[in-house]
Structure formats: C-alpha cells, structure tokens
Image (cartoon, grey):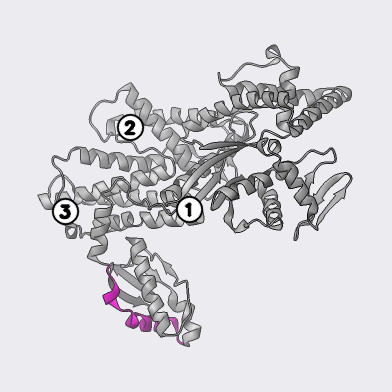
Amino acid sequence: MLLAMRSEVENAFECVCSQLDLHMSDFGLEEPPEEVEAILASNIAYRVQKEMGKPPSEVAGKIVKLLDLENFQYVDRVYAEGPYINFVPSAKYFKETLEGAQEENYGQFQKRGETVIVEHTSANPTGPVHVGRARNPIIGDSISRILSFAGYQVERQYYVNDSGKQVATLIWAFEKFNERDMGDLKKDRGDYDIVRYYQLSNVYLENSSIEDKNIAELEIADILGKIESGDEEIYQKLVSITEMVLEGMKECLYRISVEFDEFIRETKFIQDGSVDEMVDRLKQLDSAFQEDGAWKLGIPGEEKPLVFLRSDGTSLYTTRDLCYHEWKLERADKIVTILGEDHKFQAEQLTKTLSLLGAETSRIRQVFYSWVNLPEGGMSTRKGTGINLDDLLDESVKRARGEVTAREGSRIREMELKKSDIDRISRQIGIGAIRCGIVATQPGKGITFDWDDALSFERQGAPYMQYVHARCCGILAKQKSDIQGVDSTLLNSKEELDLLHEISRLPFVVSSAAEALEPHRIITYAQKLAEKFNIFYRECPVLKGTDSELMAARLSLVTATKNAMSNSLYLVGIESPDSM
C-alpha cells in the first residue's frame, strides 16, 4: 500500500505544481522519523522556495491548502510541520495492507515483460570457491531473486573462463604430473581434486631452473594457442577438466542456495568465430593501432589503451568478454554483472569499447563488491584469504549447532528436538548467518566476518529474523479455526499499527532494491520488521486475554508478518524455519 499511497501523493503534487506553474519530477518523498505520526513526508517546499519566493515553512503551508483530500484513498490527513508536508494513512490503507499480506506471495509484482541476464560468480574453473570472493554468488543470487520478485524475467548465468593462461596451465599440469605427485585430497570432489594439479604447477614454475621454466612456459603457450585455434583434442581435455571443477563448485554453491540457468563458456566465442569478427571490427575503429606487434585501442578519457590482440595472435579476456556482452545484449533488455572491485578499470574499458562499437551501453549495469575477511583466530591462524567457502559453511553450521543446543530449553515449541531437527535448524541458521552477514553490508564496503553478530538471536543477524518467522508459525499452529471476517479497525494500538505499516512497506522495498540493485535494503527491512513484531508480541496478547474478534484480527496480523518475513528472507536466500 505504501507504493499506492506514494503514487496518490505524486499525482496530487503534479496537480498542485501545474496550478503553481512549477515544473518538477521529484517531489522529495521520504519516510519521516519514527516519532512523526505520518508514514510519508515530502521536502518539496525546500525544492521550490526560490521559484515561489517564500520561506519553506510558508511554502509547505500553501501547498497543503491546495492539496485536494477528496482524491486520496490511502491518505487520511495531510499537515505541514515546518518545511515538511506529512501524510497520515487512512483506515483503507491498513485494511488493504492486512488483506494483501494474507497471501503467501505478498510483495511479489506481476510479470513486466522485461528480461534481465544476471552474470555472477564466474570464478576461474581451477579450484574450489574462495571465501574472499564469496560475496559474488551471494550478492548475484540475491539480486536475481529480487529482480524476479519485482516482475522481471531473470536468467542467471555463469561465464566459464576456460580460455586463459590459467586453464592452459591446468591442462599442462594434467599432462606433466600424475596422482603420485599430488598431495592428499581434502574432499572427494572434482574441484578439490583438480586444484592440486594447479597448485603443483605453480610450485613447479616458481622453483624450477630457468631452462625448465622456459620450456614449461613454451608448452603452456602452445596449449593456449591450440585453444585459440579451436584444436579439438585440446578442447575435449579442457571441457573434461573444467567440468570436474564446475561440478564441485556447483555442490558448494548449492549449499548456499545458489543455482544457475546456464553456463556460458568463453571458448564458445572462439569456436563460433565471434572473436575473429570482434578483432576485425576493433581494428577498423579510428583509435585502433598496432604497437610491438600487438593490437591496441585508444579509449576516450583513458590513458591506458585496451590491448585486444597479443603479438602472437591470441586474444585477451576482455576481447572475448566483448563478444559475450554483445551476445547478452541481443538476448535481454538489461544485463547485470557482479564484479570484484579489482575489475573496475577493466569494466570501464569494456563499457566504453562497447559504446565505440555502437552498443546500447545504458542497458548494462555492474555491481562491484569488496572482499570478505575473517578475524584471526576464528577458523584459522591465517587471514580469511586462505580459506575456502566450504570451510566457512562447515564452521558456521558447527557454531550454529552449539547455539541451538544451548538454547534448547527456551525453544518456541515444547516438543523435544530430534537429531534430524537439530541438523535442519543448525543448517538453516548456519547458512542463513553467512548469507545475511554478506548481504547486510553494502557491496562496496569491506566485511570482516563477526561470528557473534552473525549467529546472534538478539543482534539482528539471520537467527534474529528467522526466529520471528518460527514464532509466527508457532502461534498460528495453535489457532483452532479459520479466520474469517476480520475487522482491521480493531488493530488500533501503536504497536499494531507500527507493525502493519512495516508490513505495508515490503512492495516498495522490493521495488527500490530492484531499481538500485542493492539487496542489503531487504535485510534492513527484515530487521525492522522483526523489531516491530517483537514489540507487538510483547505488548499485544494474541491467543490469551482477548475477545474472539480481536484475536482474529491479531492472528491475521501474525499471518501477514509471517508472509512478509518469509518473502524477505527468500529474497536474500535465507531459509525460513517453521520451528527453532
């Protein structure tokens, strides 16, 4: 209803601006502080004070007088408070919020007919997913969920970097070393098996004699050339090796509820001729030039040129990425890429080059993230940069199990926990803690993971929000009959109305998070929803000490909270336990 109310207010402001001959598109709508009675406010008076030649407070008063209350369905009262114009919701606002939130898909938008390709993770297929880059799949998956919930048709893609020197080195290692050269296998899984070859190749190249190293480098360069030329034998080896890694990586990512619709191989664009065609087109650009045998492109506003063809005739990652981006632009209305902050310059070069090639770059958006670190002494004496995501997930589930066991005496449900229940709850809390800890911070800010905060039932981590969902389920499980004919006007206490207002905000938060590509907004919302519910639960008895009509209304409010919380947690990939 907040979206509907905002729309009403915007229409009303348009009418007033027309009367006053003011030309505006942004009316400065915002949510006022909690102590203000209204739920929507505008600072429009600040924006038009010069044109009107009066102080903002006087302008606000004049605009309020011009607003036609008869055109409002969801606004009960409008008043000026200094320079601000405040809007108080109507009974219809709360009634329709309560009714709408009874649906399990509350907050979800209708399909809008626009397609979005979200490319994320895309880690090199040389070994397990690393903690330092764990934000990529979690942010990418959360953005995909939010966009889909907001009505877009979303395709989640993983771009397999199977054409660079790292993969050529991996193929070389497979040919040079055998199983007896390897160290112990940490996990019986393809990504952990293959990474041993890659690690051994790096040790060999670092410690060998100059002669042996030069021979190895020539052999690796030969493999890279064969990949570029489409050599079938090398390509089959490449696919076989990288598939083993990808299968292991998929198992790890599945643990955090991350899945993909399609895996697009870099070599696809070599084999179908796209790279050769791209090189020819780049050479034709006015700013293209050859230097020391390599082809480069001067980019407006950039001191460093883009190298798109090496002197040995092989292409670079960015050359192939240009092909991939054009391929995506042909298939979607918008494309979104999740990238580490160390890729900013490369992304800028790519976007500017696409523009030179005539692409509609306004349809391209990138989300950059900073790294995840772990405090020393937690899981390892080393920094988090040496830890795989599997290790982090195992540790989180283990710690969550300790929390679940310690809190068993204060559970929501009285029934005794079975081992399977403890396993389920520990997994839901442990994995939820990781996803919440990563999504809760804006992508551009660094994260040092804090176990106490992540697994706290009180400090607004994932368990804090999951516990609210479980409590709602516990209350509703005791409900003896279906709720019908609820009178929403009975929900008139501050605690009830504050909670109902928070529930009403979900569609707006989904819409704004989708527009800004900022999943942390969902976490902030869910934390606030949990806070408001806990106050309501403490102050307003639901099943005891109330008459049947009020109980029905409050049970409806609990259902609305459950649905809003469940959908909020789903949007950031956190499970909603029915019991804890």
Q: Amino acid at mark 3?
A: Val
Q: Amino acid at mark 2?
A: Arg
What is the magenta segment's predominant secondary structure? helix
The disc at residue 486 is 3
Q: Earlier in the sequence, mark 1 or mark 3?
A: 1
Tally of marks: 3
In front of the other: 188 or 286: 286
Q: Amino acid at mark 1?
A: Glu
Q: Describe residue 66's horizontal placement relative to residue 229 as left or right.
A: left
From the image, tell me which residue sits under label 2: 407
Q: What range of the chain is rendered magenta?
A: 54-73
Please give the name of the residue rendered at 49% of the width and 85% of the height, measured from the top-left corner: 51
> Is there any visible trace of residue 369 in the rendered image?
no
Please give the name of the residue rendered at 73% of the width and 16% of the height, measured from the top-left corner: 177
Q: Earlier in the sequence, mark 3 or mark 2?
A: 2
Find numbered disc 3 in the image and state the secondary structure of the residue it sits on: loop
Q: Earlier in the sequence, mark 1 or mark 2?
A: 1
Q: Position of residue 50 (x, y in %)?
A: 50, 84
Find numbered disc 2 in the image and state the secondary structure of the residue it sits on: loop
Q: Describe residue 191's horizontal placement relative to residue 576 as left or right.
A: right
From the image, tell me which residue sits under label 1: 114
In front of the other: 122 or 313: 313
Relative vertical location of residue 255 with respect to residue 303 in this rendering, above or below: above
Could you tell me how far apart the alpha carbons at marks 1 and 2 are, in whole angstroms? 46 Å
